[in-house]
Amino acid sequence: MGKRSKRAPGIYELEPGLFKVVVSLGRDAAGRYRQHARTVRGTFRDAQALRARALTEVADGGVATRGDVRFGVLLDRWVDQLEVLGRSPTTINAYRVIARRHLKPALGDKLVVNVTTVDLDRLYASIAAERASATVAKVHLAARGALAQAVRWGLITRNPAIDASAPPVRRREPQSATPDQLRRLVDAAEPGFATMLILGATTGMRRGELCGLTWAALELPSVGVGAAIVRQVVIHGPDDQPTVRASTKSGRSRRLSLDEGTVAALRLHRERCEAVAGTCGATEHGPFVFSPVPDGSDPYHPQTVTRGFRRLCDRLGIDGLTLHQATRHFAATQLIAGGVDIRTVAGRLGHSRASVTLDIYSHLLTERDESAAAFLGTLVHNSGAGR
């Protein structure tokens, strides 16, 4: 356990600067001794303060014993904790769905202390028999996160999910719309939606970023190139309502240059929006570039945009194409095919690192590698080298 402190009971120094704090919970109905344990890095005073808080929580009944907590209860408490920590509503909802559909039916009634690596492996195998490997990976991520929190709360001493065998996720090569498909979509869409497609395809902006774009974030000069500042995103929030939040956890924005054609399309779109707002009695158009209401005061719900795109594809007889493929993947594919360097592509797409872009679009670099080989071969062989 570590060296027991001579200065205070229930405090053990595991190594220099790392203390384990133990609080007695008495004995259970079977006479077994129970305790609550936590660790803290810092000084001896930090350990004393932690033990004082733990003693208070025990006295108030705020600490559950190891044998009291079932895995389903842990999952609920863990998701609630993520919400307190400020994780996005989309992430929170995804974890709740995973817990409800997969983890709780199989392991929800099991005590946390009795959940084993074998239990998790069996669950993953049963899911893999019916679902894609990506689903199993998400279930593993949720189980591992919840059990890691159980370790931090002192409910278990080791996370059994660490050694569980989640299958590798096989990334599919992203498909994109062809230039001809994109032109057909733009020509057939109503003017406002056509402008959204144009902007998405020329910038690679995400669906939520397009929904959250405001007029104040646009630079639209009458002549020359413009710019769009991506500061916020619209997500699927509580009660199925669109929720606006910062586009990144750090709050950093990114600036995207706009070509003259896209600037002209946006300027024309603004004129139409102002005219519609005027007919409805609004003194000015609201903040959102793309809005379901005439005065532009509310953003589109991302799912509404997706459904509108599907209806457009159905009308044109285009099968299997998504909005993401017609805009974001289109932009990335055309930029890489055009020889734009990966770092610039990554910055335009808003990827945190160029390696993320490489992982997703590595298959597109094969053709460029063949072109590079041909170019170098021409230089070498035409120069007479090797004769």
Image: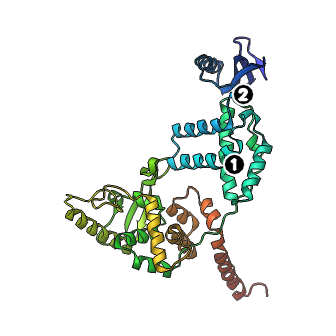
- Considering the numbered disc 2 on the image, is that residue within a helix, a strand or a loop? helix
Given residues 202 and 163, the one toward you in this image is: 163
Q: Is the residue under label 1 in contact with that under label 2 (CB below 8 Å)?
A: no
Say if 252 sits above or below 291 in the image. Answer: above
Image coordinates of residue 301 in percent, x first then y, are 42, 58
Q: At which x and y percent is residue 35?
A: 72, 21
Q: Where does the image place residue 254, in percent across and percent down from the top left?
A: 45, 57
Left or right of residue 221, residue 207 in this image: right
> Is residue 157 shown above or below 133?
above
The earlier-in-sequence mark between 2 and 1 is 2
Image: 39 above or below 123 = above
Residue annotated with mark 1: 140
Q: Which residue is mark 2?
A: 67
User: Does residue 2 appear to the left or right of 109 in the view shown?
Assistant: right
- Callout 1 amino acid: His
| Distance from Cα at disc 2 to Cα at disc 1 | 23 Å
Mark 2 belongs to which amino acid? Gly
Secondary structure type for disc 1? helix
**Image-quadrant location for residue 359:** bottom right
Residue 369, given in percent of the width and then of the height, sits at: 67, 75
Query: What residue appears at the point 50 percent right and 63 percent down from the top-left corner?
Result: 348
Choose mark 2 or mark 1, whichever is in front.
2
**Image colouring:** rainbow
Say which mark, if any, is on residue 336: none
- Report the front residue among 28 and 325: 28
Instruction: Check the picture and name the quadrant holding the N terminus.
Output: top right
Callout 1 environment at 10 Å: few (<14), some (14 to 19), or many (20+)? many
Q: Is residue 290 visible?
A: yes
Task: Identify the residue shown where x is 56% and y is 40%.
Answer: 82
What is the crowding at mark 2: few (fewer than 14 residues within 10 Å), some, or many (at least 20)? some
Res. 166 in view: no
Query: Which quadrant of the figure contains the C terminus?
Result: bottom right
